[in-house]
Amino acid sequence: MLPECQLYGTLGCHLCEVAEAVLMPFVDRGLLIELVDIAEDQALVERYGLIIPVLRRTDTSAELLWPFDAEQVVAFLAP
């Protein structure tokens, strides 16, 4: 079973759109990803503002920083 994840980003972020495209095949295979807009929370802006997009596992809180590709996502999602 795939872990649930969050993708931290914001509207108008080109790299966030690219990250979403990298993640879509995983979503098509059942990966649940919550899109978190950091602009809605000042603490998230301070933490992630310069490094978005960031993929975060909700079970372990592990984070995969951009840039990442499909192979790195597979390794990140592995138990």
Image (cartoon, grey):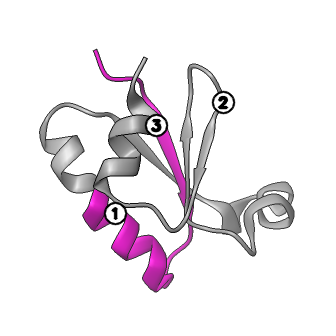
Residue 19 lies in quadrant: bottom left
Q: Which type of secondary structure does the marked residue at label 2 adopt?
A: loop
Q: Which of disc 2 and disc 1 is earlier in sequence?
A: 1
Q: What's the distance in space between the residues labelled 1 and 2, CA to CA?
A: 19 Å
- The type of residue carrying mark 2 is Ser
- Residue drawn at x 33%, y 34% as measured from the top left: 32
Which residues fall within the magenta stretch? 1-22
In the rendered view, tell whether residue 41 sits above or below residue 1.
Answer: below
Marker disc for residue 20: 1
Residue 9 lies in quadrant: bottom right
Q: Is residue 75 left or right of residue 64?
A: left
- Circle 3 sits on which residue? 76
User: Residue 16: image x %, image y %?
Assistant: 46, 72
Residue 42 on the magenta segment: no
Q: Which of disc 1 and disc 3 is earlier in sequence?
A: 1
User: Residue 47: image x %, image y %?
Assistant: 82, 59
Which sits in the foreground, 49 or 73? 73
Q: Is residue 75 left or right of residue 2?
A: right
